[in-house]
Amino acid sequence: MDLNIVWFILITVLFTGFFILEGFDYGVGMMMLGRPKNERSQFVRAIGPVWDGNEVWMITAGGATFAAFPHVYATMFSTFYLALFLMLLALIMRGVAFELRGKLKYSDWINFWDFGIMFGSFVPALLWGVAVVNLLRGLPIDFQMHYVGNFLDLLSPCALLGGIFFVLLFAFHGANFLLIKIADKALLEELRKKSLCLGIATLIAYVVFAGFAAADTDILAKLSTVIFLGLSIAALIASCAGAASGCGCKAFISSTLGIAFLTIGFFTALFPRIMVSSISPDFSLNIYNAASTPHTLMLMTGAAVVFVPIVLIYQAWTYKIFKDRVTPADVHYH
């Protein structure tokens, strides 16, 4: 197997980890909407020890893309620069909100920063969905690997539907995470019902989105992609069943698998392309014409062999340390 394929697989793994881990982070943030202060504080406490570590996956995935496929990185930034600016603004506000919301006990202060967490969770979830669809359906990229469209070209009905689908998917995943982290039984029952409703809404959005995507992209052209997407739907149905039965572990593990299969299916549909040109298939960026030199890929492979296991071990240790459920008495920390 050549190193170009190895790095495509590694980037697939990194984005899969990112969507799984940051997905429930975003979801918990969105679940804070309309909740009383004590419950919002419990939600923040549930993800407080891990949210910043989860963002490492996004940074690592972006860094790996830059190092292995620099032309993709350059073209992607020129294509999505306004969307990336909005995402960066939202993520900065979200990070600051986590750090500052507990510094003062005034309700207005806490409410303001809680809005920052909700805003900083909703916007990235929406924009990731829009970006994923645009990468699949194709962008006006010329023979010099330059994006020649504008921001409005990114906002097709299919792309916006993909954004809505991602918002619902991450909210569902976040609700399932809370099912295994919250101790209060009355709140858990309410979260279980909300998780089930979100799961059903996610499945409906998935089916509608799949119909639009099938008509607007070549996502169903490969049997392997169809299999992975089918597995993701089956996993999300199992997650709904877990929420309905009150089994939080089943619901969360199943939604985790649903996101994993969906992400793998997306990258399978792209392979060997990374960015599809809507002008001409010959202008698409793939794992060969957009890659670094073989020497660079070799050096990076050695670094990945050392550092990726370290990240995995650290992440596993963090989740083991903070595995206990959050009680109402814990909110004094936030």
Image (tube, rainbow, N blue to C red):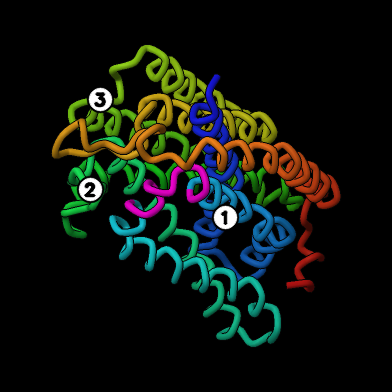
Task: Give whichever of 253, 187 is nearer the camera.
Answer: 253
Q: Is residue 194 visible?
A: no
Structural crowding at the residue carrying mark 2, measured as other residues with C-alpha within 10 Å and reported as few (<14), some (14–19) or many (≥20): few
- The three-letter amino acid code for the residue at tag 2 is Gln
The residue sitting at 71% across, 56% down in the picture is: 50
- The three-letter amino acid code for the residue at tag 1 is Ile
Please identify, in this view, whether the residue under mark 3 or under mark 2 is nearer the observer.
Answer: 2
Comes first in the chain, label 1 or label 3: 1
**Circle 3 SS class:** loop
Compared with 227, 321 (above or below) is below
Q: Is residue 296 magenta?
A: no
Residue 23's mark? Answer: none
Tell me which corner region of the image, top left, top right, bottom left or bottom right, holds residue 193: top right
Provide residue 189's location: percent of width, then percent of height: 63, 44
Tell me which corner region of the image, top left, top right, bottom left or bottom right, holds residue 212: top left
Magenta range is: 66-75
User: Magenta segment, principal secondary structure?
Assistant: helix
Q: Is residue 35 visible?
A: yes
Task: Give whichever of 15, 234 is nearer the camera.
Answer: 15
Q: Are marks 3 and 2 in contact (CB under 8 Å)?
A: no
Residue 144's mark? Answer: 2
- The three-letter amino acid code for the residue at tag 3 is Asp
Q: CA distance from mark 3 to mark 2?
A: 24 Å
The residue sitting at 58% across, 68% down in the picture is: 36
**Circle 1 SS class:** helix
Left or right of 308? Residue 199 is: left
